[in-house]
Image: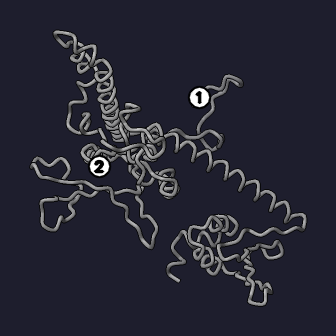
Amino acid sequence: GKQDPLTSTTVKNDESNPLQPEKSIPNEQEILQKQKRIEVVNAMKDRQKARENSFLANCIKTQIKPAVASFEDDNVSRVINTYLSSSSCTEGVDFSSSRCVSMKCDLCGLSDIALATPLVRAPNHSEWLERMPFTCGGHKSFLVASFNEDSENAAVDTVSSIGSKKKKNVEYAAVTVRLDGEIVSTKERDPTLSEKEMGIVSFLPKNERGFQYELKARARDGLPFMTGSLVAHECCALAAHKSRMERVVREEKEKAASTIERNFGNTCGRTLSLGSDDTGRCYWRFDSEPNSLFVSTENQEQHSAFLRFSSPESIASVIKSLGRNPLAFEMQKTFPQAANVLNDGTWSNL
């Protein structure tokens, strides 16, 4: 129990106090898993810091090179290498594994040397919109495949070959599995600790050698990541992510305001449509028949006709036909029974 300072009584976590949540004590295995998660995340941050330090050291040495050339003994460069490049000498995080020659950021137009920041693989707007729901829901939408490029058929091996003692020329690739055009995802085994660990802002290096090294480490440690078709500095990719998030929040607020206006209009006798699809058909829900969906179409004579769908299965079929149209998500909220038919797999068995 716990002492209540206002009443000087003991509050127990039982049925007499339903508002008091019971605290679950993590077991030893959960504690060890969390500690391991923190260790691999810190290792990921150290690798990222090492890449940034390698660029910083190179830029400093380039700037002071004319002055150092007049010295008999170049102790300055050794100091810079000691404090900035000592951890960056490892293969995969050194300067040669991060530098992208003749490449520029697709967002700001500057090179990696110009900002002293390595270039990464970032998603464009459509790729970001496609991956964001999986990331926010704690799902992995990327798989990592390894294959031996020396083999004749370049057969795909399992990721368990990562860390093998035998020295093989193994390449790694980020793979997306799709079924009927939809991404197949898996639930994260370990809970995320921050937004960066969710993967949406955890980018991979653009440099091919650095990419292979980092992808191998992510697969080994089970950490999510993000990749895409854009080349960008991490700061530019983060700024784009923030801008997209603000845009999504603004659009959701506008949708909420529109929904509230439609609901109030319905109560006042002024019915507004749920929306329209790409072909111009309008979708309606009337208070007189709240469980039915009405679709208005126009024939060749420009006369409107209404199609009525009353069963959850038929409404679910209409929603499915809309694909990824935002109207489909709005209709799932309006017709929860039809949404259940889609979510529990009943619709696919009809």
SS class, disc 2 = helix
Tell me, yes or no, whether the two marked residues, 1 and 2, touch with CB atoms within 8 Å.
Answer: no
Given the image, on which type of amino acid does mark 2 rest?
Ala
Task: Answer with the quarter of the image where residue 232 lies.
Answer: top left
Q: Earlier in the sequence, mark 1 or mark 2?
A: 1
Camera-side residue of 200 and 15: 200
- Please tell me which residue is depicted at 42% across the width and 39% down the height of the picture: 233
Camera-side residue of 20 and 161: 161
Given the image, on which type of amino acid does mark 1 rest?
Lys
Going by the image, does 266 lie left or right of 84? right
* Residue 238 in picture, x, y percent from top left: 49, 40
* Residue 112 in picture, x, y percent from top left: 37, 36
Task: Answer with the quarter of the image where residue 274 lies.
Answer: bottom right
- Please tell me which residue is depicted at 70% across the width and 66% down the height of the picture: 334
Going by the image, does 130 lie left or right of 210? right
The 10 Å Cα crowd at callout 1, few under 14, some 14 to 19, many 20 or more, is few
Q: Residue furthest right?
A: 268
Q: Is residue 38 above or below residue 198?
A: above
Rendered-image quadrant of the N terminus = top right
* Residue 166 in picture, x, y percent from top left: 9, 49
- Please tell me which residue is depicted at 29% across the width and 29% down the height of the picture: 54
Between disc 1 and disc 2, the foreground one is 2
Q: Is residue 201 above or below residue 71?
A: below
Observer able to see residue 5: yes
* Residue 189 in picture, x, y percent from top left: 38, 50
Going by the image, does 162 lie left or right of 116? left
Which residue matches tag 1?
2
Number of marks: 2
Q: Residue furthest bottom?
A: 301
Which residue matches tag 2?
219
Q: CA distance from mark 1 to mark 2?
A: 44 Å
SS class, disc 1 = strand
